[in-house]
Image (cartoon, rainbow, N blue to C red):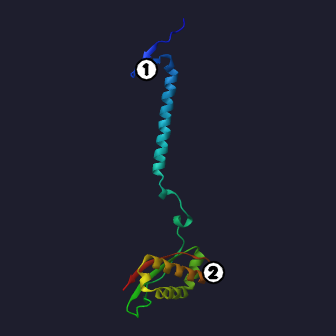
Amino acid sequence: MAQSIRPLRSAQGAFVSKKAFGNGTAKLIIALVVLGLGIGGGIYFGLRELTPADMPKSKSAIAPGPIQEFDSVVVNVAGTNGERYLKAAVALELTTPQAKRELEVRKAEARDIIISQLSSMPLGKLQIEKGRDELKQGIQRAINDLLMQGKVERVYFTEFVIQ
């Protein structure tokens, strides 16, 4: 006895074969849909949790190098005839521990370089970010010329007051 295929009317009015959605096929389709939703959800939540802040950027972003701090210095601002002064404290991020040890030994020379750089900058440049960045670069270059066992990676102003 051959089974006859009877057309069924679906909710939308189209005719659907009863045999087309037998037990095995329906289970397979449902399993694929559930699997697809699971994979899609996993990818979505996985990417949502992994933000750019979590991704490693560079060695210096993960672990800064050794820091050498210098006490505050007060210098006359260039071009003000002694009427304005700058009080600043500087910290240097170095590439190696050897550079930090060398800088500790040569601290007086480094401090003199910092004072010279700070006092040579005119007031107009000290008051704008671009001028302060230029000052940091000047300090970095001059101290890098002094060092033999490493370099200055970054210069930070830990105090910066113009009066």
Specify the farthest residue to the top: 1
- Under mark 1, the amino acid is Ala
Relative to 73, is 24 above or below? above
Specify the farthest residue to the left: 163
The C terminus sits in image quarter: bottom left
Percent across and percent down for residue 41 are 46, 41
Percent across and percent down for residue 30 are 48, 28
Which residue: 46% across, 50% down? Answer: 49
Which residue: 55% across, 63% down? Answer: 58
- Under mark 2, the amino acid is Met
Q: Secondary structure at mark 1?
A: loop
Rendered image quadrant of residue 97:
bottom right
Percent across and percent down for residue 50 are 48, 52
Query: Disc 2 to disc 1, how far (Cα)?
Result: 84 Å
| Residue, disc 2 | 148
Counting residues from the start of the chain, the first of labels 2 and 1 encountered is 1
Q: Is residue 63 left or right of residue 76?
A: right
| Residue, disc 1 | 14
Q: Secondary structure at mark 2?
A: loop
Give 7 or 97, whichever is nearer the viewer: 7
Relative to 16, is 138 above or below? below
Which residue: 51% across, 31% down? Answer: 32
Specify the farthest residue to the right: 148
- Crowd around label 1: few <14 · some 14–19 · many ≥20 (10 Å): few
Percent across and percent down for residue 155 are 50, 76
The N terminus sits in image quarter: top right
